[in-house]
Amino acid sequence: MRHIPGAWSRAARGAGLLAPDGTAVATIFAEMSALAVSTGAINLGQGFPDEDGPAVVLETAREAIAAGANQYPPGRGIPDLRAAIAEHQERFYGMVLDPEREVLVTAGATEALAATLLALIDGPEDEVVVFEPYYDAYAACVALAGARLVAVPLRRPDFQPDLDDLRRAVGPRTRLILVNDPHNPTGAVFAPEVLDEVVRLAERHDAVIVTDEVYEHLVFDGAHTPIAAREDARSRTLTISSGGKTFSATGWKIGWVSGPADLVDAVLAVKQWLTYVNGGPFQPAIAVGLRLGDEFFRDMAAAMRAKHDLLGAGLRTAGFDVIPPRGGYFTVADSSRVCDRLGVADADALCRILPERAGVAAIPLTAFVTAEHRAEYATLVRFAACKRVDVIEEASGRLAALAG
Ligand SMILES: Cc1ncc(COP(=O)(O)O)c(C=O)c1O
């Protein structure tokens, strides 16, 4: 095979995201989705909803297309969406933002993350502290930005980090602390003392805090509190979110980043050379979504919680030990007893036979961790609960067969 050089392949090889010969490493997500298709299994691996979001949001996008909103929107995003994002942050979190300077629309949360890392990383000595397991794009974006990833493990029973681990991870080289709250894949919601420590450490080492809050409206007990809503954190925090999860429109890729104008400008300086803009007709639709009444947001969280409860009950019947999530799309379960019964070594091996054996596909948690910490997560499996109730019921029924 031809050797294809490039900054990305160099960085990605270093981070284990490409094979030494430069070929792509097949992700477990692609592998499990392909297995799901070939076996006819229900795919609880990938985190996308199988139901549409609010009709008014979909209709607004249709109308925008019909009305000709099909060309490049402004570089920062259409004014109405930026205003809706600012209104949303004030309504839910009491944060006042200038939609002209402090809000930037991006191609999903993923582009916001990538542009933020590329904008704020200075060189190979810079470190980015993340909590692991982590959304897989984090390692890829950190590699692309040429920085070093420093992972702080989230620990059972409730997937909070050990504060001493966190203190050891953050130091003079820390450029960014990346916090995903509510958390994918564990379903954790960070305890206030963890967020306090993040803010304290960021201040002490003059690091920027970047928060990924794409599951902000999927907190099952109490309300979400963004780090940026804390007075002492606001000036050094960039808040990232997306309409994908909240409005069941993951394919639209409308995300945003908000925070101090100088940091947002730095992100814009990169973003304008990545996608420049995206999703013209979807931007007004997400603006309508963000202005929906409180009951929409309440009902959505309650419905997702009910799905987790249903899935959790099915997993328990099948012999898994469920760690109930406090937010987000995913339920994590310990598969030790199921692995023993089926004679497989760990969750990775289990997930490879589950589609054939039980007609359900899921992802081992080791897919979201650095090699160093794999053993700690070896028995854990992530199941997506963001599916129709009848699909979860069918999956539960299939998994129950594992219990013999
Ligand atoms: C934690 C987290 N951040 C970001 C994303 C991606 O968001 P978007 O589709 O808006 O790029 C996901 C999607 O799974 C996620 O789980």
Image: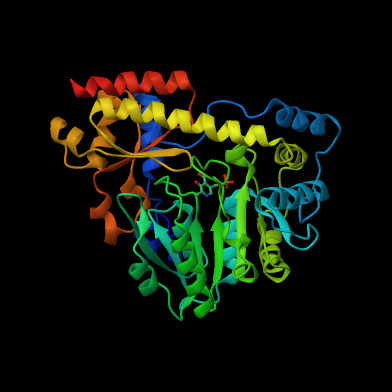
Q: Which residue is drawn at 49% across and 49% down?
A: 182
Residue at 61% x, 62% y: name it: 228
Q: How many marks?
A: 0
308 horizontally vs 322: left or right: right
Q: Identify the residue at the far right of this view.
A: 67
In front of the other: 330 or 268? 330
Q: Position of residue 384 (x, y in %)?
A: 42, 35
Q: In this view, does 39 lie above or below 350?
A: above
Residue 391 screen position, x and y as percent: 44, 21
Q: Residue at point 14% right, 35% down? A: 340
**Visible residue check, residue 364:** yes
Colour scheme of this structure image? rainbow
Left or right, residue 134 beside residue 82: left
* Percent of width and height locating residue 403: 20, 23
Identify the image quadrant of the C terminus: top left
The residue nearer to you, when weighing 234 against 21, is 234
Q: In which quarter of the image is residue 14?
A: bottom left
Picture quarter containing residue 229? bottom right
Q: Can residue 40 be seen in this view?
A: no
Side of 228 relative to 289 (left or right): left
Residue at 52% x, 67% y is 145
